[in-house]
Amino acid sequence: MSDDGPSSASTSRDPRDLDTSRTPYQLPFPKEAAAEIVVSATIPEDERVWVPQMEHVWFRPLCLNIVQGYWVNLLRVRKAGVLSRHRHPAPVHGFVLRGSWHYLEHDWVAREGSYVFEPPGETHTLVVPEDVSEMITLFHITGAMIYVDPYGKQTGYEDVFTKIEMCRAHYAKNGLGVDFLDQFIR
Ligand code: FE
């Protein structure tokens, strides 16, 4: 340490230098940490990003997590009526961006701006009402969607890997390319 010492150094320093509130974090991130995902237009301008699920139903991937087994996507439905009946073995979070929908098993309606938590153990039947021409909902789905008949007999399932397969197949043939999906996988 020099004769000036810390006291004289601090008197000559601009006091604004001491405010670190706008100083970015100075250390490297953990090297195992995954990269962030930023999707600036969740509702894409390029129609090809929407992956067909069935007639008049599409999803748009946002985050497909192959280690924790969940996926975040927008679901877009442009038809009224029953969409699917399914069981959730793990939690789901939903946020409605457009339109509205409800479940046969509950008396509430999810409307534009609504948030919905679907706890593990829920089995429900999604219905889009007649007066809704389009609904778009962001769903964060963990584990699987288990499709069932009214008595719980399984008729199909989806998980993050079946979603990935559908996306890859769609993007491979529509010109976006099979690698287009990589940006959403963690
Ligand atoms: Fe559900």
Image (cartoon, grey):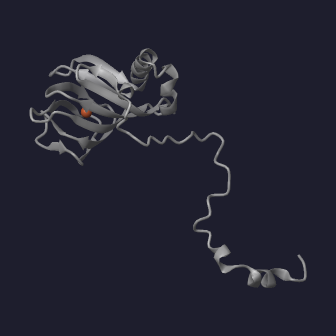
Residue 110 occupies which quadrant of the picture? Answer: top left
Residue, far front: 45
Q: Position of residue 35 (x, y in %)?
A: 56, 40
Nearest the viewer among 52 and 140 is 52
Q: Quadrant of the N terminus?
A: bottom right
Residue 42 occupies which quadrant of the picture? Answer: top left
The number of discs equals 0
Q: Which residue is located at x 15 percent, y 37 percent?
A: 102
Q: Position of residue 130 (x, y in %)?
A: 9, 32
Q: Position of residue 18 (x, y in %)?
A: 66, 75
Q: Position of residue 156 (x, y in %)?
A: 28, 17
Q: Which residue is located at x 20 percent, y 25 percent?
A: 85
Q: Which residue is located at x 40 percent, y 41 percent?
A: 41
**Is 159 above or below relative to 90?**
above
Residue 86 occupies which quadrant of the picture? Answer: top left
Nearest the viewer among 77 and 109 is 77
Q: Which residue is located at x 29 percent, y 32 percent?
A: 75
**Is 124 above or below relative to 33?**
above
Nearest the viewer among 149 and 98 is 98
Q: Where on the image, by quarter, is ligand 1?
A: top left
45 left or right, relative to 155: right
